[in-house]
């Protein structure tokens, strides 16, 4: 599979862009464990153009995480074009346009998935960004605004005609948010459409190696993108890669090994930001990590993890869990 001049191995698996999740430390871990491409947190075009420091900081990328995509969102053509030019200066491998975020503060203002209610504007933004930059431009979107307005079939062709190099489709509508089950049939129909010649990347409910294999085998996508299932589980890419390649599970990936990874993520965030905010940034991964599921009487420990505000305090809690399970 190719996106522009980027070549990927057979059946590539990408890390989805996620706000407050796909920071540089987490991306590097996912890359280490086999992610074929990673994406930054999504970036507000208007905030970037206004040089908001917290937004500009999201553009930081490192060579060891390449190929890496930077995703921008907005509803103003000029701001999106200017933001894309600014993004290009930091040399990402891909610029991705977010037409899929369903949250109210984005979609409710007409950006993200809100663009599904204004297709002409979506297409205008896409055409102008493609013309303005020299790196591959891709799009991530959903099936439609709601179940009565599934538009992805014709929309995919129109976006392709705007010059994008790949299209990621999340198998839900905006109105579904993240509820229910992702519908991959419309994604398969886009992929099978003889008018489509760009790569189609499937997204939605890829929670296991079996899910990833099914996406390739049953729906024919060129790549899959994993989102929420990576929370507290950056090693999912190694699990998926081994399964797709017919390899046996890595026996060293036991509880203690996985806890080491989460502790490394904590240290990375504390060193990268500061102790308090680094802990805050990591706690959602610790809370969501599947390695703690099934541990008897874990509720009080989970609460302690979520309340910890010092590095030594949090590490002590995690090490106590390790000793209990040794």
Image: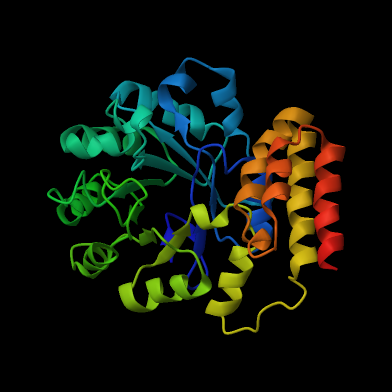
Snapshot colouring: rainbow
Q: Residue furthest top?
A: 50
Q: Residue furthest front?
A: 297
Percent x, y of residue 29: 68, 53
> Which residue is painted at 36% across and 22% down in the image?
79
> Which residue is painted at 26% across and 68% down in the image?
188
> Which residue is painted at 80% across and 64% down in the image?
256
Q: Quadrant of the C terminus?
A: bottom right
Q: Quick check: can you spot residue 62?
A: no
Percent x, y of residue 51: 53, 17
Percent x, y of residue 307: 71, 36
> Which residue is painted at 39% across and 67% down in the image?
222
Q: Quadrant of residue 40?
A: top right
Residue 70, above or below 210: above
Q: Residue furthest left?
A: 148
Horizontal placement of 321 versus 156: left or right? right
Q: Quick check: can you spot residue 26?
A: yes
Horizontal placement of 80 versus 210: left or right? left
Q: Quadrant of the N terminus?
A: bottom left
Percent x, y of residue 146: 19, 46
Count of numbered labels shown in the rendering: 0
Nearest the eye: 173 or 25: 173
Residue 43, above or below 92: above
């Amino acid at each position: 599979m190719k996106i522009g001049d980027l070549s990927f191995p057979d059946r590539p698996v990408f890390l989805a862009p996620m706000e407050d999740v796909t920071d540089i430390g987490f991306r590097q871990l996912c890359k280490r464990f086999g992610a074929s491409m990673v994406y930054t947190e999504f970036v507000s075009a208007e905030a970037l153009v206004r040089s908001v420091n917290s937004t500009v900081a999201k553009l930081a990328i490192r060579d060891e995480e390449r190929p890496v995509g930077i995703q921008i969102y907005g509803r103003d053509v000029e701001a999106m074009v200017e933001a894309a030019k600014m993004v290009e200066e930091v040399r990402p491998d891909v610029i991705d346009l977010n037409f899929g975020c369903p949250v109210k503060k984005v979609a409710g203002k007409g950006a993200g998935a809100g663009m599904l209610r204004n297709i002409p504007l979506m297409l205008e933004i896409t055409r102008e960004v493609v013309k303005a930059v020299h790196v591959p431009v891709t799009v991530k979107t959903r099936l439609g605004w709601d179940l009565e307005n599934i538009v992805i079939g014709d929309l995919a062709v129109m976006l392709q005609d705007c010059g994008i190099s790949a299209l990621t489709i999340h198998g839900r509508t905006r109105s579904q948010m993240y509820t229910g089950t992702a519908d991959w049939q419309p994604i398969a129909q886009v992929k099978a459409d003889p008018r489509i010649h760009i790569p189609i990347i499937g997204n939605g409910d890829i929670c296991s190696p079996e899910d990833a294999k099914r996406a390739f085998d049953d729906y024919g996508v060129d790549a899959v993108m994993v989102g929420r299932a990576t929370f507290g589980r950056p090693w999912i890419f190694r699990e998926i890669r081994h399964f797709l390649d017919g390899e046996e599970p890595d026996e060293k990936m036991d509880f203690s090994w996985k806890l080491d990874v989460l502790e490394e993520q904590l240290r990375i965030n504390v060193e990268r930001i500061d102790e308090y905010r680094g802990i805050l940034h990591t706690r959602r991964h610790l809370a969501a990590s599947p390695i703690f599921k099934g541990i008897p009487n874990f509720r009080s420990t989970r609460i302690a993890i979520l309340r910890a505000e010092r590095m030594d305090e949090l590490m002590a809690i995690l090490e106590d869990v390790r000793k209990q399970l040794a």
